[in-house]
Image (cartoon, rainbow, N blue to C red):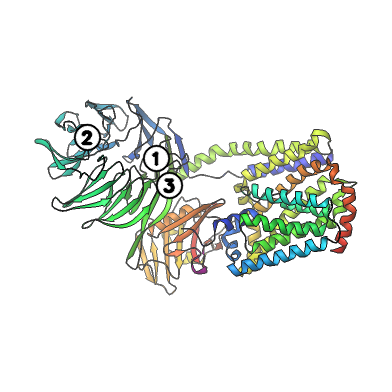
Amino acid sequence: MRKRISAFVIFILLSISLSSTSAELNERISINLDRGMISTAPVTNGEIVIIKSIGHLTALDINDGSEKWMVEHPTPHFFEISPPLFHSTPENDLLLVGWTDGMVCAYDATTGEEVWNRSTEMKGYGITGALLMVEDEVIVPYDHGLMALDVLTGSLSWDVVVEEQLFYRSSPAVFGNTYLMGSETGVLWEISPNSAPSQFYSPSADIESPMIRGPVMVLDDRILIPVQGSSNGSLIETDGISTIVHPALGTIAILAYRDGGVVVATSQYTTVYDCETWCVALQTLTDESVTGEVGFENGVITLPINDAEGRWLRFNQDCNLGNCTWVKITPLLHSQPQYLTAGAGYFNNAIFIANDAGWVDIITNGSLSSIYNEKKEQNNTPEGDVFALLFILPGAAMVAIGVRKESWAKYLPALGASIILLGAGYYLQAISELTTPTSEVSEDPLRELMPELWKGTQVVVFEFENGLPSRFTGNETFLGSNGELIDSHQFAGGGRVFVGGLEGYDDVRSLTIAAAEIAALAYQEHSEDMGYRVDRIGGVIDGGGGFWLLYWEDGIIGQQAIDANSIRGDAVIIWRVV
Amino acid sequence: MESCLSKESFKHHIHGIGPSRRFMIGLHPAEVGQAAFWIIHLVLLCVLMVLIWSTLRRPLGRDMGLFMTYGITAIAGRLLLAGAPNIQPVTILMLLAGAHIGARRGMALAVLTTLVSNMFLGSGLWTIYQASGWAFVALLGGLFSHRLVENGRINMWRLASGGLVLGFAFDWWVSLYIFHGGASFSTYLQYLVTGLSYDLLHALGNVTFALWLAPILNRSPELNLIRTNSHVRSDVAVV
């Protein structure tokens, strides 16, 4: 009896100690809108984020993801691919939305109330292209024509019907005083309010069942036309005199352009072109299927991978001695993987991602992270306690009851131990944090070198003999949280880059990623069962030449995965090669 | 881009031994070249042959069946639980095998189990430490067979206690290989501390397996533990 009581007491004490440790905090809010497929990227006006799903518009608070309002607009189709568009007026922010039933509506962004609407005749898929603001008019591509509406009242300015043609996901591109829009027959139409539409480009007979399902791109004196075929397709580049045909097999995604670079993604492969002059293929990024909204902002290419485990692959440019390549950086993973075509919404304090499953994930950082973590801590600690007890108490009771029992009861200790083992596996992170010593004070000598204003903030140092871009080589460079250069002076040991003034990062991983982005250093990692490992920072490759990328946290060598434990609010993380 | 270390060997490292959380510094010395890889396996095969040869002086008889049963259970258990963090039945099975079929046969079984399971999970320098660690567990099983088996029945609580202690001891032994990478003793201690949670899982797993296996084995008249107990002690004397 005494043994049973002792065993029970030990396990109760164990349960209390485990329960007091909070469960793993996650920098992610996942919301099941349950309003059908989401096929367009979230958009924001800085206060709310709009998610468009089938027959619904949902406004989420940009800070905490809470729902501000929702609008229902029943439509006949099971997809909605025309992206919403914000327009600021002196009175309020308007949200302009085209629906697949052919109706275009303007909503008050603050309340969701409809300000005006206008119907177009639906011959095919209604409105599936992107709306375009030109001065005070919104240009609306509907499924067999183009119209312009006054943005404040919705009154019709002009309407051009292209007879016997259908448009799908085709958006108007401004071309001088006219608009270009491709049709389901592969013909590119030049549309002007003052004249009848004319054929600007007709596909050659080489392309089977040609279609233009996306906006064309106007580059100074040239036009890029994505023409997809049933078995082959092409990116047509023309200046009206000469034409170059670039192969583009499969379904072509929305083209993306930035600073002379064009990303051409298809269901078969994705290629980056240098289109400063006539386009030249630079690099194939992936052979995974990309059919939706490609992102190309702030030097990062974001590709929505349209397969069952849909995720957003991301690339940024890594330049070394004048040679630049696009390298894969941390992809965006969704908590509910599913096919997807929607682009990612990069906002100041979070990335919003949504997929065909109708779930929205908000990957937080900065202020949003701290708000959310506070909430999670408040909410989860009691739940975590109860959950831990669910493993420990029955397990301990079974062990105690089954001691020295015969018949079936002799298996009770085994059953009890199994439940406790399950609990220990579930709370592995918490146990690790209990058993891992953490430094109470920052002891890293590099602190002394840092600016005063970085006191109390998080800092990442990249200290490499080789592998830093030339701008950092031979220097000790101090960069602020917005990438501003604070100081730079000569340094004898290769190069040392300090990125400081960072706040709100919970682990080495998120902090390092943020710092690498600020310093424009390529960053690659991969996930293992026990957490993330860094494969590359800048030109330094983990394991290359028998050297390894290791990190020091507040002067102590890091021995865990980079996302395995939480870090202090004034942590100094140093990356070195050993 | 993958690191030079193969995923297989990384996974193996995680699940095959205890200190998986220590991988940030622990993995690097674990890598060996092609030549060293073959030398390690040749040495272990030689050890296996010597152990098996020395046990043949006494006819295997019914022990052959037990040898096979323990071996298959240990290998299959380790492979099937490869996804669980440092939870596997090999340690407790080697302890039982040592107590049951003799120290030398238990040690041979330990080497065999390590070699075969590492064929799937990945092999490296750690294979030597694992094989020797589990062989030592089997030796302890043989040495303390009279305590683990009383009146022909396995003492469940002693087996569980042994598993608890050996869970930590085995992991700490295997962690010694970081010295091949030039680690200092203080690094080793730090390394042990950071992996404690995984050692705890190994130990708790051993206890759980002991609590399941003892009542099941005690039900089996085929095991004839009284007979085994006597020849196990003579076997230990030879070792």
The one nearer the camera, A2 or A307, is A307
Residue on which the image places disc 3: A332
Residues rendered magenta in the picture:
A542-548
Q: Position of residue A168 (x, y in %)?
A: 26, 35
Dot 1 and dot 2 within a common chain: yes
Q: Position of residue A460 (x, y in %)?
A: 46, 60
Residue on which the image places disc 1: A340
In this picture, is B109 found above or below A158? below
Q: Earlier in the sequence, mark 3 or mark 1?
A: 3
Report whether residue B19 is seen. no
The chain that hosts pointer 2 is A
Asked if labels 1 and 3 touch by Cβ distance under 8 angstroms, the answer is no
Residue A141, disc? 2
Q: Position of residue A110 (x, y in %)?
A: 31, 32
Q: Amino acid at mark 3?
A: Leu
Q: Position of residue A560 (x, y in %)?
A: 57, 56
> Is residue A544 highlighted in magenta?
yes
Distance from Cα at disc 3 to Cα at disc 1: 12 Å
Dot 3 and dot 2 within a common chain: yes
> Is residue A122 highlighted in magenta?
no
Q: Earlier in the sequence, mark 3 or mark 2?
A: 2
In this picture, is A513 found above or below A304? below
Q: Work out which quarter of the rendered image holds the N terminus of chain A and state it.
A: top right
The one nearer the camera, A517 or A313, is A313
SS state under label 2: strand
